[in-house]
């Protein structure tokens, strides 16, 4: 494993990407202690004030400090996606490997269901659930984990197909191992790398999805600071107070670019290249 | 200097050529060291060596080509007095393919699948000749005739997939001959082909070598194939030529210890004994610099060998040899007669395994088939065989004969359509793995052909061995470790191999791990599917030796599948010959090999190559590959040189006893003595 990390860091994309991701994670953890102002502090005198020595990134339409809100704005997104991503990869990965190993009718039926899910725009599917059950973390995490696990099924199934026809699987079947044992001991080690990279990619897409939901008003509820929500609030004033949009946009983009660069470098370090390009 | 037995000018002259690559830490690692080789017009020279010996690199260097990452360290490779490595790209390209042609291994893959045969040859003619359109189309027919393909006019408009492997190889040869090359390079041209097909291709190559003034460089790991085609042989080891000379001399009484070891490691058709294994493994590039590269594996080794790298020196009998002790080389035995104890089995015991009238089909009847009520002929039919405890049964046949299919069925991976599997006389073995009892699973183990495929690349040796130990015996912790080490020791691997991944092992070591995994279950029956065919000959000998030891320890029964009849002879007690999924001949190895009675067995045995320049394969049937067995009659009817006419095509032949325990399934009248030994076969068409 250490050789993979070393290889990752020796690539410019890996080093930059990992730096961005680690920076964001650290900032998210220390933000409450270092933020110069209270994110809720409303001041009508400071409304849409330009960046200056006191408020480094200016103020929003309610006079709240943009810098403090940007610092804190990724916490919710990172928390929700940080929990949902591993769940998505684990369940999608398991189902994908299982389907890839079983083949036949199980494969036919399940993959058509997957196709059906993938053919609908993701935002529609998620809005249905969120509108029905609300926007709490308890709803967002399973919703994201469920929908983002579905494409993982395809990746895991494809990676499984690469190895399932090889003789060591036949050998395990002939010895009489059960399916779970074959999945865990024989298939998973061969599919693990693909899932790791896929997980990194899913994470970045999930962050985008979470921010999009917030932007549409279905994610985090005000006054909690969130990048998507901040962009939605500030976009009306974009022509004369662009800092309100720019700050969260740069924060969100740098995190997503960081994750993408890391995933790219990770794929190269592990010797697999990206299977799919980013959606949208 | 290399030996020359004629005064012709060399077409290819390689002088002190060293080729290498840069290692991870920046050091230069040579893969070829100080090669001197000259090939004259009309001469055929064989480059023989095991994988990694540099033989292919040398052949490619003879056309000025280096694989990626390789570079010339010193020396020259000259064609027609021009150093190929200094020629401008354009000139080099005009030489390659035209004046120097290459026939690669596996040419089926080098033909364009979407282009007709004629068009592909025509393309080669366009590139390398100035012929007119009409002249080219005549030339295509000429070339197809020259490589002895039947009905060239008709064949010209076929696609590669419509041709058999042997025919594809012939087309590749025709394409190489299109530019009337001065030098023909052949890189393992028959590897991967069936024995009969291989014998036919080699016969063609020998004829081509005889009828033209082309120089031939033939690369192969197979001394038998080299012996058929080449007058000169150069033996390569660890990037050096260690022995070069006249083929008869080199193959009869080689002067280099490695060449002798190699020769002794080849199983022979006429010897029932196991070949001698060559211990150790060749050095990696750069591992050995100032000593003899073979010193670590040589039985004659002295201190002198390790202090100085021997020069290639000419000896009185005409060869060049790279060994200081070549005068003593004849101390090393090259015959393999009776150096192992005979294998005995108890014939009176209850059968360990019995196959009763097995019929296996890959075809699953679809809705349309059921509606039309069309039956397909099953892949494998009517297989009845009995194996005694401790007995080794060899299953032989060409590719597609159903050998591996039968093994899969015994292993429970492919349920048969009908028939029965019996263990220990009466215990019925369920067809599917899922229905078998843990004990039944444990007692039947399988070893696959290619250890690269059968070992999980992401598991260490310890994890690989732990799978059966945990599953069947529930071992864990210290006990598991101890048992794994015992198993490694039994396959003669040191305990430090435990933490290695398969990628860190050599081919032979991997196959040992695969064998250890099978024996971890303490099985009664081990199914061996071409277990040595992916290995080098010297490694093969060691693996055969290991299998022999293991079966003696616990009276293990083997079903040993192989396409190599000499390997089957070395290990098996009894042999069953399969053609198109039907048994042709069953009997003890001694009896079948001494008096093969089924015409197909004759054909197979006749096509086997021996590393002896005087033995030529007997080609009695053509090498047309059949895709499916005929609906009625004898499966071999269409290729049979002794066909009796109608009776063969309408009636399925019954079993006939040749001698005690030796039977054939053929209409030939054995009592009238129509069947003869395989080297005296005559074509008979009388009804």
Image (spheres, grey):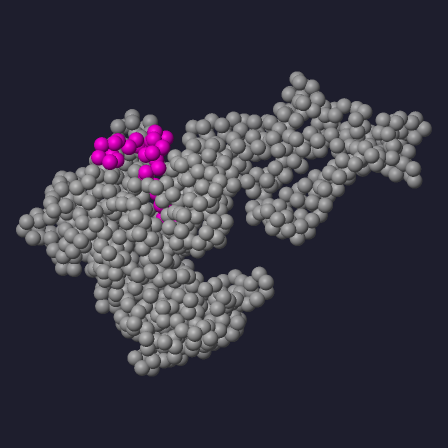
Say whether residue B424 is left or right of residue B133: left
Of residues B650 and A77, the one nearer the viewer is: A77
Say whether residue B631 is left or right of residue B142: left
Quadrant hosting residue B665: top left
Query: With respect to residue A265, does B87 lie above or below?
Result: below
The residue that appears at 64% across and 28% down in the rendered structure is: A144
Whether residue B430 is in magenta: the answer is yes
The residue that appears at 53% across and 72% down in the rendered structure is: B73
Of residues B112 and A43, the one nearer the viewer is: A43
Q: Can residue A5 be seen in this view?
A: yes
Q: Is residue B106 visible?
A: no
Of residues B338 and B583, the one nearer the viewer is: B338
Quadrant hosting residue B80: bottom left
Tell how many labels. 0
> Which residue lies most toward the top here?
A132
Quarter of the image with the N terminus of chain B in it: bottom left
Q: Position of residue B544 (x, y in %)?
A: 31, 54
Q: What stretch is highlighted in magenta?
A: B422-451
Q: Position of residue B334 (x, y in %)?
A: 28, 67
The residue that appears at 92% across and 30% down in the rendered structure is: A46
> Which residue lies most toward the left here?
B672
Query: With respect to residue A131, does A77 lie above or below?
Result: below
Say whether residue A193 is left or right of residue B661: right
Say whether residue B72 is left or right of residue B566: right
The residue that appears at 11% across and 44% down in the rendered structure is: B656
Q: Position of residue A237 (x, y in %)?
A: 84, 31
Q: Position of residue A203 (x, y in %)?
A: 65, 35
């Amino acid at each position: 494993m250490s050789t993979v990390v070393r290889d990752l860091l020796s690539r410019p994309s890996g080093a930059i990407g990992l730096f961005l991701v680690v920076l964001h994670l650290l900032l998210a953890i220390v933000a409450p202690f270092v933020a110069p102002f209270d994110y809720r502090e409303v001041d009508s005198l400071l409304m849409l004030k330009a960046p200056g020595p006191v408020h480094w990134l200016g103020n929003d339409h309610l006079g709240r400090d943009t810098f403090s809100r940007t610092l804190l704005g990724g916490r919710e997104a990172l928390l929700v996606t940080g929990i949902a991503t591993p769940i998505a990869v684990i369940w999608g990965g398991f189902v994908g490997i299982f389907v890839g190993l079983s083949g036949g009718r199980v494969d036919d039926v399940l993959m058509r269901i997957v196709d059906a899910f993938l053919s609908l725009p993701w935002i529609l599917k998620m809005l249905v659930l969120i509108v029905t059950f609300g926007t709490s973390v308890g709803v967002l995490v399973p919703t994201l984990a469920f929908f983002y696990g579905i494409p993982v099924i395809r990746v895991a199934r494809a990676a499984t197909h690469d190895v399932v026809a090889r003789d060591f699987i036949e050998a395990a079947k002939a010895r009489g191992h059960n399916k779970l044992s074959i999945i865990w001991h024989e298939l998973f080690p061969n599919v693990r790398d693909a899932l790791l990279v896929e997980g990194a990619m899913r994470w970045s897409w999930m962050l985008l999805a979470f921010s999009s939901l917030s932007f549409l008003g279905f994610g985090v509820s005000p006054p909690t600071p969130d990048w998507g929500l901040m962009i939605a609030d500030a976009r009306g004033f974009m022509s004369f107070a662009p800092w309100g949009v720019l700050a969260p946009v740069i924060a969100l983009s740098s995190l997503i670019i960081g994750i993408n660069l890391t995933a790219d470098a990770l794929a190269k370090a592990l010797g697999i290249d990206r299977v799919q390009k980013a959606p949208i | 200097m290399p030996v020359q037995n004629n005064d012709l000018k060399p077409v290819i002259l390689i002088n002190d050529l060293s080729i290498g690559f840069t290692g991870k830490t920046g050091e230069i690692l040579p893969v070829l060291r100080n090669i001197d080789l000259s090939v004259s017009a009309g001469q055929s020279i064989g480059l023989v060596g095991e994988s990694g010996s540099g033989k292919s690199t040398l052949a490619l260097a003879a056309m000025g080509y280096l694989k990626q990452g390789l570079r010339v360290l010193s020396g020259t490779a000259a064609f027609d007095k021009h150093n190929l490595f200094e020629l401008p790209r354009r000139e080099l390209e005009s030489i390659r393919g035209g004046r120097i042609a290459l026939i690669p291994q596996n040419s089926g893959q080098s033909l364009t699948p979407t282009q007709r045969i004629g068009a592909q040859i025509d393309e080669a003619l366009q590139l390398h000749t100035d012929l007119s359109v009409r002249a080219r189309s005549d030339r295509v027919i000429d070339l197809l005739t020259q490589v002895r393909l039947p009905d060239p006019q008709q064949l010209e408009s076929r696609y590669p997939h419509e041709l058999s492997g042997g025919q594809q190889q012939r087309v590749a040869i025709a394409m190489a001959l299109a530019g009337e090359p001065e030098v023909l390079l052949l890189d393992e041209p028959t590897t991967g082909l069936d024995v009969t097909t291989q014998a036919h291709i080699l016969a063609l190559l020998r004829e081509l070598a005889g009828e033209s003034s082309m120089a031939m460089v033939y690369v192969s790991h197979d001394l038998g194939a080299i012996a058929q085609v080449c007058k000169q042989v150069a033996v390569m080891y660890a990037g050096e030529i260690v022995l070069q000379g006249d083929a008869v001399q080199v193959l009869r009484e080689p002067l280099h210890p490695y060449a002798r070891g190699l020769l002794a490691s080849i199983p022979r058709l006429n010897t029932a004994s196991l070949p001698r294994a060559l211990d150790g493994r060749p050095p990696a590039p750069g591992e050995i610099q100032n000593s003899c590269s073979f010193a670590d594996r040589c039985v004659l080794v002295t201190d002198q060998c390790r202090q100085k790298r021997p020069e290639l020196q000419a000896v009185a009998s005409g060869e060049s040899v790279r060994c200081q002790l070549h005068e003593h080389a004849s101390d090393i035995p090259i015959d393999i007669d009776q150096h192992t104890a005979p294998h005995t089995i108890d014939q009176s015991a209850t059968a360990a395994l019995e196959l009763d009238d097995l019929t296996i089909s890959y075809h699953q009847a679809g809705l349309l088939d059921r509606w039309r009520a069309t039956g397909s002929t099953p892949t494998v039919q009517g297989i009845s065989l009995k194996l005694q405890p401790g007995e080794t049964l060899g299953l032989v046949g060409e590719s597609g004969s159903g050998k591996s299919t039968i093994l899969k069925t015994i292993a429970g991976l492919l349920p048969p359509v009908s028939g029965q599997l019996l263990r220990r006389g009466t215990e019925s073995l369920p067809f599917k793995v899922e229905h078998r009892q843990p004990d039944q699973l444990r007692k039947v183990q399988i070893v696959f052909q290619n250890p690269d495929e059968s070992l999980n690349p992401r598991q260490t040796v310890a994890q690989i061995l732990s799978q059966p130990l945990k599953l069947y015996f529930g071992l864990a912790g210290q006990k598991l470790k101890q048992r794994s080490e015992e198993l490694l020791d039994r396959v003669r691997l040191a305990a430090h191999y435990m933490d290695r991944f398969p990628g860190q092992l050599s081919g032979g070591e991997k196959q040992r791990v695969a064998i250890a995994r099978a024996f971890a279950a303490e099985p009664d029956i081990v199914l061996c599917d071409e277990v040595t065919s992916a290995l080098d000959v010297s490694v093969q000998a060691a693996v055969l030796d290991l299998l022999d030891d293991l079966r003696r320890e616990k009276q293990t029964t083997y079903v040993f599948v192989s396409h190599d009849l000499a390997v089957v002879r070395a290990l098996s007690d009894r042999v069953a010959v399969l053609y198109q999924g039907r048994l042709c001949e069953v009997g003890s190895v001694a009896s079948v090999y001494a008096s093969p009675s089924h015409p197909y067995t004759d054909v197979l045995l006749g096509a086997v190559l021996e590393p002896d320049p005087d033995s030529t394969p007997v080609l009695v049937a053509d090498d047309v590959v059949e895709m499916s067995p005929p609906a009625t009659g004898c499966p071999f009817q269409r290729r049979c040189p002794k066909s009796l006419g109608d009776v063969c095509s309408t009636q399925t032949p019954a079993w006939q006893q040749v001698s005690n325990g030796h039977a054939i399934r053929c209409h030939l009248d054995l009592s009238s003595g129509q069947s003869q030994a395989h080297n005296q076969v005559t074509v008979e068409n009388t009804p």
